[in-house]
Image (spheres, rainbow, N blue to C red):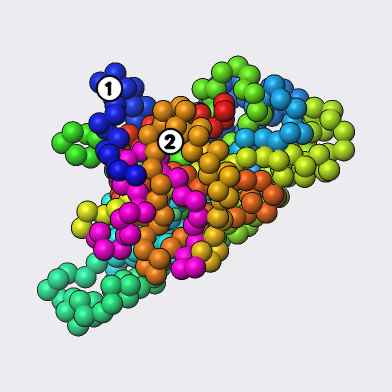
Amino acid sequence: MERHSGWKRKSQEEIKRLNAFSEQYKQFLDVAKTEREAAAQIEMTLRAHGFTSEMNGPRIYAVNRGKEVIAFRKGSRDLAQGLKIIIAHIDAPRLDLKQNPLYEDVDLALLRTHYYGGIKKYQWVAMPLAIHGVVVKADGTLVNLVIGENDSDPVFSIDDLLPHLSHKHQDDKKLSEAIEGEKLTLLFGSMPLRGEEREPVKKAVLGLLREQYGLEEEDFISAEIEVVPAFKARDVGIDRSMVGAYGQDDRASAYPLLAAMVDLDEEPAWPVLAVFIDKEEIGSEGNTSAQSHFIQMFLQDLIEGLGLGNADALMRRLLFRSKAISADVNGAVNPTWQEVHEKQNACYLGGGICVTKFTGHGGKVGANDAHAEYVGEIRNILSKSDVIWQVGELGKIDEGGGGTVAKYLAEYGMDIIDMGAPILTMHSPFEISSKLDIFEAYRAFKAFFVS
Ligand code: MN
Ligand code: MN
């Protein structure tokens, strides 16, 4: 059970390959910051590799409301014997604009937000932010917005209190209360409309929105606008061994999964299914989440498309017989916060993909706990394929914890286990991964699909 850095096992040739892979990974991170953008990129890649929405071909995909994608590849085995499934999520913690967000105060135009998922609120102030999203106008037309990603774009920001004045109202508070949710308001403009007495700055920014995007203030009601960091993915470290970027939970799984799915040889033995899911970060609620019935509906359509008879019964049977990976990141041992980890059962940056038998919190509550037999199978697959991997759970028993979508797929009766890259500073605007671990995730997913 000795631990070794994965880098020691990599030849110069393999390091070249994993560096090339991480260049593509970084590009994906830059163009897929929201679940909608990730779904669009995934669809584009699938189509470029011959996937179609025709329910009778060898490569099929379907999109649910622009936020969830399922891709299927026919295998040589009988579908009724089950599928190999890997599921990863494409939503990430962020700030969403409220439905009536705009106001003017102290000669500034501001936008109110409501954060999405588990963020540390103090991490989102005093940095450049971009807005991404869609607005459905009164006439039903949809406007796509991305502002803050081009170098020539303006960015947005949330102000913080200067240290000179923060003593009473901030410094002595608990960290979790130092920035309240309602203080996460976005600076949106400061130039008043000439000749206007009431709310001249608000009127000026509304004028710009009308002019540039054809939007009215009421259109925010039917909008989904997400506030995300405005910076791009970057190499981290003098040796460029790490990637720093927003949204790596869970693009660190979603991108390797997409790459594995399109790179498989012509006909895998098992039929395989890749699921890119939404709403994991808020507990898998809603009709684009792992608790929705889209997977079932997709499989029923598939079975009917292939002319295989009673879709409902067959779908239940094949899901029960399927084998799955819940691909999600884990928390790597923090160099300066080692006390939150039980280091004998924690994962380490650069140690390869992390296999997690169970999730949940104290007492395995809310966990999916993979059976020993299934862990044995997985262990065998990874070792045979020479994948660099490690085992790890999330933090000390009573320190906290976290869940994934695994338990929602386990309900169908399939075997499922958690697996993913270790991440530092998870859920922050700038999460850190090891290029080696991302590449090993790709190799592990591919090995699982073809085994
Ligand atoms: Mn995750
Ligand atoms: Mn997460």
Which range of residues does the magenta coloring cover? 337-363
Relative depth, front residue between 257 and 202: 257
Q: How far apart are the two marked residues, 2 and 1, measured between alpha carbons?
A: 18 Å
Q: Secondary structure at mark 1?
A: loop
Q: In the displayed structure, would residue 18 be above or below residue 245? A: above
Horizontal side of 46 relative to 2 (left or right) equals right
User: Quarter for ligand 2?
Assistant: bottom left
The residue positioned 53% from the left and 44% from the top of the image is: 375
Residue 339: in magenta span = yes
Identity of the amino acid at label 2?
Ala
Q: Position of residue 31 (x, y in %)?
A: 42, 36
Q: Position of residue 39 (x, y in %)?
A: 54, 39
Residue at label 2? 441
Identity of the amino acid at label 1?
Ser
Q: Position of residue 376 (x, y in %)?
A: 53, 41
Residue at label 1? 11
Q: In the displayed structure, would residue 231 be above or below residue 272? A: below
| The N terminus, quarter of image | top left
Q: Are there few (<14), some (14-19), or many (20+) residues within 10 Å of tag 1?
A: few
State yes or no: Cβ of the residue under disc 2 lies below 8 Å from any atom of ligand 1. Answer: no
The residue positioned 82% from the left and 33% from the top of the image is: 304
Q: Nearer the viewer, mark 2 or mark 1?
A: 1
Report if residue 183 is visible in the image.
yes
Question: Residue furthest toward the bottom?
Answer: 168
Horizontal side of 251 relative to 1 (left or right) equals right
